[in-house]
């Protein structure tokens, strides 16, 4: 079985999933950063399918970029511009060819946290 990558965004300030948040996935190579996918989170704060499915999975270095500022503005949580948090990049490596990688984001207007989930 090939590996795959999923993500999940929870709005810790409102205590709910972050619906409608744009996420972009990039591969990081010697030639630079290459966009592989762009998706929106659903009502559960997840993407409707893996952001990197088994058919496209390769080990390597990647970056998820979460468009937190757009979400915070749309949800009425944005303060004065510029926002404290706008785009949140998370760069990580995937070294296990048959593993499920899950990279969630816990978000509020002034903080965020991530971890390797399951």
Image: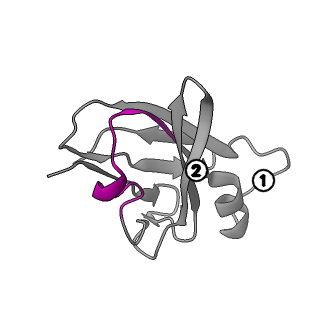
Residues rendered magenta in the picture: 50-63
Front residue of 19/34: it is 34
Mark 1 — residue? Answer: 79
Which is more foreground, mark 1 or mark 2? Answer: 2
Q: Tag 1's secondary structure?
A: loop
The disc placed on residue 70 is none
Label located before the other in sequence (1 or 2): 2
> In this image, 114 relative to 80: left or right?
left
Q: Residue furthest left?
A: 1
Give neighbour class at mark 1: few <14, some 14-19, many 20+ (Cα, 10 Å): few
On residue 66, the disc is 2
Is the residue marked by circle 2 packed among few (<14), some (14-19), or many (20+) residues within 10 Å? many
Q: Nearer the viewer, residue 43 or 13?
A: 43
- Give the Cα separation between the discs numbered 1 and 2: 18 Å
Q: Is residue 101 left or right of residue 70?
A: left
- On screen, residue 94 versus residue 34, left or right, reads left
Q: Pick whichever, 106 or 98, lies toward us.
A: 98
Residue closest to the eye, 62 or 32: 32
């Amino acid at each position: 079985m090939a590996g795959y990558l999923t993500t999940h965004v929870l709005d810790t300030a409102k205590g709910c999933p972050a619906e409608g948040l744009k996420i972009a996935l990039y591969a990081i190579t010697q030639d630079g950063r290459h966009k592989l996918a762009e998706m929106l989170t659903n009502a559960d704060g997840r993407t409707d399918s893996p952001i990197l499915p088994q058919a496209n999975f390769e080990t390597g270095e990647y970056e998820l970029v979460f468009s937190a500022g757009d979400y915070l503005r749309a949800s009425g949580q944005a303060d004065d511009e510029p926002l404290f948090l706008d785009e949140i990049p998370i760069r990580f490596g995937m070294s296990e060819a048959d593993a499920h990688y899950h990279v969630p984001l816990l978000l509020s207007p002034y903080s965020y946290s991530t971890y390797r989930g399951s």
